[in-house]
């Protein structure tokens, strides 16, 4: 059978943890899918995209993002995965991705579920599987939540980080006071009652080199969290927030067990500290009460047509009660010299937040060219009407992210180099040398790991089940 020259396949593999050693492991997926390309698609023209240690609950994964950039450049005809949940466990994320695949004419194939979307039946099967996969994920989440709440009502520990002042006791399977750290917590309460300032207290703790639980710096938020935590007075509180840093739930959903364990702060001292916190919060609220509406992007926008600033005003109230701001060019509004359109928070918010997210993602990826950086930055619905980004801005951002100029066929960076210090060439050489050394060490480490895994799994070319 002749190789189909028109096929080019993107193989995507993923595991949730770096230590996952089972039938879903990276070597197993890689072996199965490369064999599938050879014997089913009759091609060896494929590229593997591999995310190790990333959850499938969202699409914020480096290899996945790199693959989607290449798909948008029309470099692939198919995506091949071992199972559908390897690429996404979220119905909405997958639906958005699938619509984009159809836009670029890319066929989605799942080896394990044995379907591909090049046929109407395959597409229907995909949608059915997605619905049940989402249902299974939610049912599992509900079962886990019910179990955790049941344990909490009995005063049992549910595996969160042990707070400073305590250490884990394997016998009781519950935190017990740590004498050294407990003194730090007691100091925090005593000093706060006197100073009445979380920020001043955090600065003092950092100046005195008093260690935190996990080696970081003290912040006003860290101090505030310790003062607000009822665990220190012996009260066990669970189901308080939607997630570790999420919004608070209704009080009728909280699980509160008083005198559940040994406290390290007297209840009266804890209450006094919290009364001071409440009082300070009330003063702060009164101070800023006059600001009923905040124009988030006020004095931060400049018109590219006439170089005037934008004037912020209130927009109409939406059905959900949200009142965004709208911004008009001063050159159009007062001077009548510009035809720029007004813009709203509804557009600006997603645009700017998505751009920030894309910049962060870009900083965690290996990007060689200005064009690749631009493609990464323009990923997402807010940029569907954006044709390009100013090339000089891209060059500056590239250097800021990677500390070295980019290479590109279409753009020279001579002007950028001239604006850098004269010793930049030597700096670049040193940077690349260190980067190369790191790649060599990583390659050696991963090669040894693969050899051990191959010995462990004993893969063969016939491994197609």
Image (cartoon, helix red, strand yellow):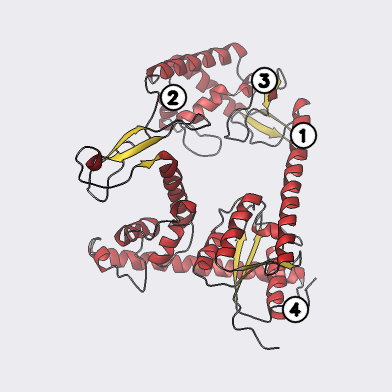
Separation of disc 4 and disc 2 at Cα? 64 Å
In the image, residue 225 above or below residue 363: above
Disc 1 to disc 4: CB gap under 8 Å: no
Which quadrant of the structure image shows residue 336? top left
Label at residue 146:
1
Q: Which residue is mark 2?
A: 201
Q: Nearer the viewer, residue 398 or 202?
A: 398
Percent x, y for residue 161? 63, 36
Q: Nearer the viewer, residue 425 or 237?
A: 237
Disc 3 to disc 4: CB gap under 8 Å: no
Which quadrant of the structure image shows residue 100? bottom right
Helix, strand or loop at label 3? It is loop
Label at residue 461:
4
Disc 1 to disc 3: CB gap under 8 Å: no
Which mark's residue is nearer the viewer, 3 or 4? 4
How many marks on residues? 4
Percent x, y for residue 194? 45, 14
In the image, residue 18 above or below residue 372: above
Q: Can you name the residue that lies furthest to the bottom here?
A: 2
Which quadrant of the structure image shows residue 115? bottom right
Separation of disc 3 and disc 2 at Cα? 24 Å
Q: Can you name the residue that lies furthest to the right here?
A: 465
Which mark's residue is nearer the viewer, 1 or 3? 1
Q: As drawn, is 302 to the left or to the right of 216?
A: left
Residue 54: tell me if it is visible. no
Q: As drawn, is 59 to the left or to the right of 314?
A: right
Q: Earlier in the sequence, mark 3 or mark 2?
A: 2
Residue at position x 49%, y 69% in the image = 73
Residue at position x 75%, y 61% in the image = 125
Percent x, y for residue 311? 29, 36
Label at residue 234:
3
């Amino acid at each position: 059978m002749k190789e189909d020259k028109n096929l080019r396949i993107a193989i995507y593999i993923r595991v949730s943890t770096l230590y996952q050693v089972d039938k879903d492991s990276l070597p197993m997926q890689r072996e199965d899918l490369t064999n599938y390309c050879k014997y089913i698609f009759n091609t060896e023209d494929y590229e593997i995209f591999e995310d190790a240690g990333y959850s499938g609950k969202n699409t914020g994964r480096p290899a996945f993002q790199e693959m989607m950039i290449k798909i948008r450049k029309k470099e692939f005809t198919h995506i091949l995965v071992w199972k559908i949940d390897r690429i996404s466990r979220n119905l909405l994320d997958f639906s958005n991705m699938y619509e984009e695949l159809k836009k670029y004419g890319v066929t989605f194939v799942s080896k394990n579920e044995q379907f591909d979307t090049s046929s109407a039946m395959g597409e229907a099967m995909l949608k059915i599987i997605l619905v049940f996969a989402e249902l299974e994920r939610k049912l599992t989440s509900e079962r886990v939540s019910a179990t955790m709440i049941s344990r909490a009502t009995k005063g049992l520990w549910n595996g969160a980080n042990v707070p400073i002042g305590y250490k884990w006791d394997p016998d009781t399977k519950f935190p017990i006071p740590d004498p050294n750290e407990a003194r730090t917590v007691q100091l925090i309460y005593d000093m706060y009652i006197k100073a009445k300032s979380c920020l001043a207290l955090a600065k003092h703790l950092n100046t005195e080199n008093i260690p935190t639980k996990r080696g970081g710096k003290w912040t006003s938020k860290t101090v505030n969290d310790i003062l607000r935590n009822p665990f220190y007075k012996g009260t066990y509180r669970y189901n308080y927030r939607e997630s570790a840093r999420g919004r608070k739930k209704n009080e009728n959903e909280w699980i509160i067990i008083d005198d559940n364990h040994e406290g390290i702060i007297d209840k009266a001292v804890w209450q006094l500290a919290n009364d001071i916190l409440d009082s300070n919060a009330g003063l702060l609220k009164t101070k800023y009460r006059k600001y009923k509406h905040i124009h988030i992007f006020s004095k931060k926008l400049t018109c590219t047509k006439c170089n005037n600033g934008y004037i912020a005003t209130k927009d109409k109230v939406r059905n959900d009660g949200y009142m965004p701001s709208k911004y008009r060019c001063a050159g159009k509004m007062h001077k009548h010299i510009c035809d720029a359109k007004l813009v709203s928070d509804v557009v600006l918010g997603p645009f700017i937040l998505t751009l920030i997210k894309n910049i962060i993602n870009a900083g965690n990826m290996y990007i060689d060219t200005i064009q690749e950086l631009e493609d990464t930055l323009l990923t997402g619905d807010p940029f569907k009407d954006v044709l390009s980004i100013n090339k000089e801005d891209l060059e500056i951002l590239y250097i800021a992210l990677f500390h070295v100029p980019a290479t590109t066929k279409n753009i020279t960076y001579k002007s950028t180099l001239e604006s850098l210090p004269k010793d930049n060439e030597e700096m670049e050489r040193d940077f690349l040398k260190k980067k190369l050394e790191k790649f060599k060490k990583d390659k050696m480490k991963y090669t040894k790991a693969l050899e051990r895994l191959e010995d462990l799994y004993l893969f063969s070319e016939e491994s197609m089940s």
